[in-house]
Image (spheres, rainbow, N blue to C red):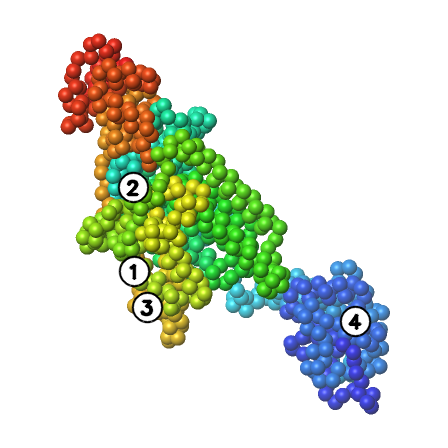
Amino acid sequence: MTTEQSASGSPPPDAAAGNADTAGKADIAGKADTAGKDATAGKDATEAGTTGETGAEASGTAGKTDAAGKDATEAGATGGTDAKTDAADKTETDARASDKTDASGKTDPTGKAGAAGTAGTEGAGGDGGKAAKVEDGRGKAAPGKAEPATGKAGDGSGKAEDGKPDRWEAFASAPEPVPSRLGRATRAVGRLLVHEWTLASLASLALAVLLTWPTLRYPRHTLPQDYWDPSLQAWQMAWSGHILLTNPAQLWQSNTFFPEPWSFAFSDTLLGYAPAGMLGTGPEAAVLRYNIMFVLAHALATLGAYALARQLGAGRIGSAVAGVSFAYAPWLLAQAGHLHVISNGGIPLALAMLARGHGWSLRHGYRPERRHDGWVYAGWLVAAWQLSLGFGIGLPFAYFLAGTVLVAAVTWFLRRWVVRPVKRPFGRRLFIADLVGGLLFAGVGALLAIPFFTVAEAHPNAKRSIGDIAIYSPPASGFFTAPAESRVWGGLHEGARALLPWHPEMTLLPGFVLYALAAGGLFFSVWKLRHRLLLLAGVVVTMVLAMGTRFFDGTFTYVPLFEYLPGWNGLRTPGRLMLWTTLLLGLLAAGAVSAFATRVREISAERIPSWPSPWLRLATLLPLVLVIGEGLNSTPHPVVPPQPAAMRTVDGPLLVLPSNQSLDQPVMLWSTTRFQDVVNGGSGFTPRQLDDVRRVTLSFPDQVSVDYLRVLGVRNVLLMRDHIAGTPWEITVDAPVDGLGITREEIGDVVVYRL
């Protein structure tokens, strides 16, 4: 601070002008009195004392600033007019010359004024070191004594200047205890357990157990809906795990449909579940594995849709509505026997991760500061894993990702260079992550597609036609018809189902509650209007595509996709595109429920006291409860046919009779004990050779059938007595085999013919 003299050269009448104010604790020279100040102030003052500045500026420019951030100018302004006389200048000069300050900040015993540097050494704060006090307005300084910090107030000892206990210490805040390593670990675990994503995961898992019940009641002996396709898929998981541990090169040459090559690619493979298939052996382990993955698939679908809605900007309750409606939509209850359709949680989860990595949300737009390439890599990995579960729902997902990348790239380019030529950072790391992740996803898709294209070339009857698509194309009434497995609507919609040509794939009701919430979301939502319109457009487009050839014969909708998009002609049931309709409806509903919950919080804040009534809190949960109610199932859980003892002892290649699509799928499951080669098999199509085997062996055992099977390489034939009623074998099962060169023996209820 620059000291200003009055026009007459005499001190101002206010004697307090030279005293330090109570806020800044500044002396006449602008120095801070460190009594009660923190250690930083003491340090600064010590440094000043070390350099010989004892609180008096010899040049007459007393402009020091204390360590607490208070400028001496404020002190001078508070005290009135800060004037400096010649006598004060002299006093300061004498004090500076006489003051001997060592490196520790201690003053000379002469006790000269201006020992501000010494006072600063009492670093704990308090009155450990008193600076010199100005006695009068003429600038004379009284001798000041620097007291040592030991035992003084502010040094942590709890004693005042006279050594007595500080009576005010009891009112001070207790020091924060330093937690131990175990305490820190406990706190970290506690924070993890109450984290939103931990709670969401646990809630999704608990809800999956409840809403799929009684799947886990007898998990080793029953299968949801029926034991045909679930038996096939239980075998698929078992085979992939077994062969990857023993001979990965033979993955696609499975032990079924002998001697057909590439038989593992006759239907969707669930290859992504191969790690689960490495645990346990035999049919019971395979059934248990299937049931566990069935429940986990529902949990992942709930969590994935929840994560997507949260990333896009919905609230917690709205996101929960989106998650539950996506995983437990009534139409999905008819797909309980198709694990590759139920296993759809990777779709919304991958989209959520990719959006998170790119710093984008529907509600807030693009936020570059939230970019994270790690989430981008994770998103592409999850997308590749989802594709490995099957092309039935994975192929539309792949085309959706490709379209999204194209639209995003074009939009970014236009906004960056054309519409608004401003810098919109993307980042090299993010670009590399997208490039590497996209190539990984495309590579996995290409490697998985090669066996399927090979099968399509070798088996022309495996290809779908427009006529096949027409058989499974649902009418518009299917969007309002529930399957028989729906506990709420199943019985009420029995008459409507009777009018559908193939109701298992045509009952596509996503839920009347979901319809209502989505409709409300068009008018009252946290999403912007243009986003609501885009979601509505997506709902309409996916519904039209799900109708297949029912919408104006699909001429301008489904048929072009069938004819021009690679792999699309392998999709048999267009109604499964309802998966995307359900997801988009859930996002619309999430916007409405989130806006409603926000409004409830606003109303609660206006109340005195600001606390929501129980009715308001229950109202926010009502949409979630209603959606859960519509997802209740009455799915049957039949007992799986037990494995015949002969399947555990007889070597392959073997044929099990009778043979048909329904009976061969349990045979595939029975083979998981030894994985011996079997002629039997069930899939989305039947190879011509298996058709020939079934036709020729109707007369077994006779010379023609025996010779045919020997040429094929079959060594043993198992004839099950429990299934021959009404078949030709009911008569020939006990016929003599003399002259055929074969033997016969009984193992339980199975007749074993050794060729």
Does residue 729 sit above or below 133 in this rendering? above
Mark 2–mark 1 contact, CB under 8 Å? Answer: no
**Dot 1 crowding, Cα within 10 Å, few <14, some 14–19, many 20+:** some
Label 2 sits on a secondary structure element that is loop
Sequence-wise first label, 2 or 3: 2
Mark 4–mark 3 contact, CB under 8 Å? Answer: no
Any mark on residue 337, and which?
2
Q: Position of residue 667 (x, y in %)?
A: 28, 28
Q: Is residue 1 visible?
A: yes
User: In percent of the image, x 15 and y 28: which residue is there?
Assistant: 726
Q: Is residue 265 visible?
A: no
Q: Nearer the viewer, mark 2 or mark 3?
A: 2
User: In percent of the image, x 64 and y 63: which residue is there?
Assistant: 124
Any mark on residue 513, and which?
1
Any mark on residue 16, and which?
none
Disc 4 designates what residue? 112
Q: Nearer the viewer, residue 91 or 633?
A: 633
Disc 3 designates what residue? 616
Amino acid type assigned to the residue bearing label 1 in the image: Val
Q: CA distance from mark 3 to mark 1?
A: 20 Å
Sequence-wise first label, 4 or 2: 4
